[in-house]
Image (cartoon, rainbow, N blue to C red):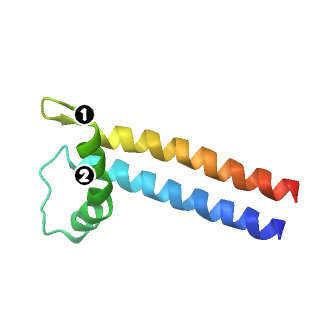
Amino acid sequence: MDYFIIALARILDLAFNLYIFIVIARALISWVNPDPYNPIVRFLHNTTDPVLYRIRRIIPFQLGSLDLSPMVLLLLLSVLQQVLVNFLVRLASSL
């Protein structure tokens, strides 16, 4: 059972890292004028926009034209990743 929980923690850690890279890529392409019909741009927007819109509604972080919601999301993802993965690893070690 403990191997299953460790494997689940690793998969969860990988999923968080992957989503963090997607958010970083989304923030980087926002600095240029990307083609909105490009499949990669559409994928990045489709995977990050729902979460970023919720953050923008709750906490309107903008300094002029600079949108800080990706930074808030990255901070939240990092904290959540540490809490959940460490909890699962400790749970597995206690079994």
> What residue sits 66% from the left and 61% below the top?
10
List x then y, in percent, for residue 78. 51, 43
Q: Image quadrant for the C terminus?
A: bottom right
Residue 86 vs residue 29: left or right? right
Q: Considering the numbered disc 1 on the image, is that residue within a helix, a strand or a loop? A: loop
Which residue is disc 2 drawn over? 53
Q: Badge 2: how crowded within 10 Å, few (<14), some, or many (20+)?
A: few
> What residue sits 23% from the left and 50% below the top?
29
Numbered mark located on residue 61 in the image: 1
List x then y, in percent, for residue 53. 25, 52
Place residue 9 in its image quadrant: bottom right
Q: Considering the numbered disc 2 on the image, is that residue within a helix, a strand or a loop? A: helix
| Label located before the other in sequence (2 or 1) | 2
List x then y, in percent, for residue 89. 75, 53
Q: Does residue 16 lie above or below 3 as drawn? A: above
Numbered mark located on residue 32 in the image: none
Q: How many marks?
A: 2
Residue extending farthest top: 63
Q: Does residue 87 lie above or below 59 as drawn? A: below
The amino acid at mark 2 is Tyr
Contact check, label 2 and label 1, Cβ < 8 Å: no
The amino acid at mark 1 is Phe
Gap in angstroms between the C-alphas marked 2 and 1: 11 Å
Residue 20 vs residue 40: left or right? right
